[in-house]
Amino acid sequence: MWPRVNGLRVMELGTPDGMRAELNALVLAGRKTTTTGLLADYAQESEHLEHPGERLALLDDHGRPVAVIEITGIEVLPFDAVTWEHAHAEGEGFTTLDDWRAGHRRYWHALGTTAEDHTPVVCLAFRLVREAPDGGDG
């Protein structure tokens, strides 16, 4: 199971090596409003999918909450069906859908997973509710 903070499930973007801080900064600046994960990770962690309206605590490298976000949309798609609108809204500076796909394949490969075109991914859209150093439920 994924951790909980003050009753909220958590979201940890990227890896805790500087990447997470960069991604969190994009969320706090309003530039990152989507993210993509592997569906297999949910089964591996015995977690259910997020749902619209659910609020999550966004954590930093040390497991401390930095914000509360609210899920505004969710889609489960094959990796090759992710749209440019979703990819662009990740706010990470990708200039094309092919660039986005290559970047995500490299990321998942570094974590020991291969993402094929047919690999199911979870596309989450969210909004920043508030910065929340206390991890409150907002």
Image: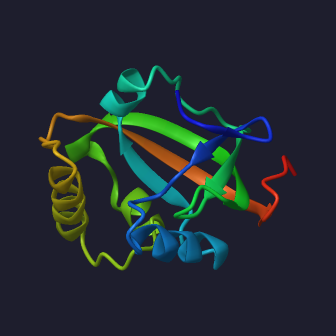
Residue at x 20% of width, y 45% of height: 80
| Residue 108 on image: x %, y % | 22, 51
Residue 5, given in percent of the width and then of the height, sits at: 72, 43
Please give left or right for residue 83 compared with residue 112 in the image: right
Q: Position of residue 44 (x, y in %)?
A: 35, 24
Q: Residue at x 16, y 60 (%)?
A: 106
**Residue 57, relative to residue 119: is it above or below?**
below
What residue do we see at 16% from left, 34% from top?
A: 118
44 lies left or right of 127? left
Q: Residue placed at 51% from the left, 46% from the top?
A: 124
Q: Quadrant of residue 76?
A: top left
In the rendered view, would you say 44 is above or below 91? above
Q: Is residue 82 left or right of residue 85?
A: left
Q: Nearer the viewer, residue 35 or 75?
A: 35
Q: Quadrant of residue 39?
A: top left
The image quarter in which residue 83 lies: bottom left
